Image (cartoon, helix red, strand yellow):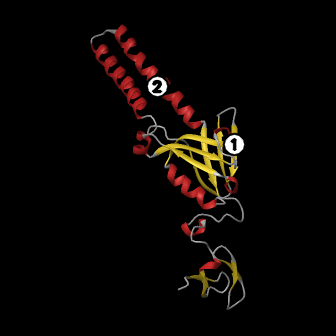
């Protein structure tokens, strides 16, 4: 039995059926003659994403995970800051001002560490559109890499055990038919929800 796809005409808004073999093509409406595009079951539109044709539209824009990527570093920073504050307060109560200043040293170290970490977090961004994937690095001096989804030949996800638990990972996009690490166009570590990113990109790839 042949499966059919039910369409609503963009012009007259009447429903009609076409063979599923027509998925991804254009067919005329039997009522008004207007040409309609038949969505493929794996097309971006079928899951609510912008179509791969027409103007470029943003889908996602995000930065690598911060706390989820390095929870132990976050814990150490928290211990430095909180421990230093508690030590300074206790030393201040007994007028041990030398100990107060010494106790504040871990607070400063923790805050500087956190500030550098946050700046590194801000310096990297991954942006997905319905046409391409764009990777930007740097705050003052920026470096941008991009690859068209139609040109992606390989998309790899690498996850350690901890990254699987935290739902992060490393994504590598390769636009060369030859593959290999040297041909990789974009590599981003600590990407949140990497399999979701792959699912979106696969909708636009020429597979």
Is 43 located above or below residue 154 in the figure? below
Q: Say whether residue 67 is left or right of residue 61.
A: left
Q: Secondary structure at mark 1?
A: strand
- Residue contact at pointers 1 and 2, CB within 8 angstroms: no
What residue sits 44% from the left and 41% below the top? 163
In the drawing, what numbered circle is on residue 28? Answer: none
For the residues labelled 1 and 2, the Cα–Cα distance comes to 32 Å
Is 187 located above or below residue 116 in the figure? below
Is 187 located above or below residue 204 in the figure? above
Q: Say whether residue 103 is left or right of residue 182.
A: left
Q: Dot 1, crowdedness within 10 Å: few (<14), some or many (≥20)? A: few
What residue sits 57% from the left and 57% below the top? 200
Q: Residue 166 in the image: x percent, y percent?
A: 42, 44
Q: Dot 2, crowdedness within 10 Å: few (<14), some or many (≥20)? A: some
Q: Say whether residue 89 is left or right of residue 58.
A: left
Q: Nearer the viewer, mark 1 or mark 2?
A: 1
Residue furthest toward the front?
178
Q: Residue 84 in the image: x percent, y percent?
A: 36, 20
| Quarter holding residue 108 | top left
Is 207 located above or below residue 88 in the figure? below
Instruction: Report the label total.
Output: 2
In the drawing, what numbered circle is on residue 145? Answer: 1
What residue sits 42% from the left and 31% below the top? 74
What residue sits 37% from the left and 8% below the top? 98
Q: Quadrant of the C terminus?
A: bottom right
In the drawing, what numbered circle is on residue 111? Answer: 2
Mark 1 or 2, nearer chain start: 2
Q: Residue 61 in the image: x percent, y percent?
A: 59, 49
């Amino acid at each position: 039995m042949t499966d059919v796809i039910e369409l609503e005409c963009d012009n007259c808004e009447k429903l009609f059926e076409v063979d599923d073999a027509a998925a991804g093509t254009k067919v005329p409406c039997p009522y008004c003659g207007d040409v309609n595009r038949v969505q493929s079951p794996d097309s971006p539109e079928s899951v609510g994403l912008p179509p791969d044709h027409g103007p470029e539209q943003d889908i996602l824009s995000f930065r690598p995970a911060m706390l989820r990527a390095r929870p132990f570093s976050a814990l150490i920073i928290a211990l430095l800051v909180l421990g230093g504050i508690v030590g300074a307060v206790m030393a201040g109560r007994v007028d041990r001002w030398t100990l107060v200043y010494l106790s504040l040293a871990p607070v400063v170290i923790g805050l500087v560490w956190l500030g550098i970490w946050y700046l590194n977090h801000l310096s990297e961004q991954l942006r997905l559109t319905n046409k391409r994937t764009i990777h930007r690095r740097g705050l003052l001096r920026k470096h941008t890499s991009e690859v068209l989804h139609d040109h992606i030949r390989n998309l790899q996800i690498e996850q350690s055990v901890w990254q699987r638990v935290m739902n992060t990972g490393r994504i590598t996009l390769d636009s060369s038919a030859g593959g290999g690490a040297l041909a990789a166009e974009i590599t981003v570590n600590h990407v949140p929800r990497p399999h979701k990113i792959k699912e979106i990109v696969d909708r636009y790839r020429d597979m």
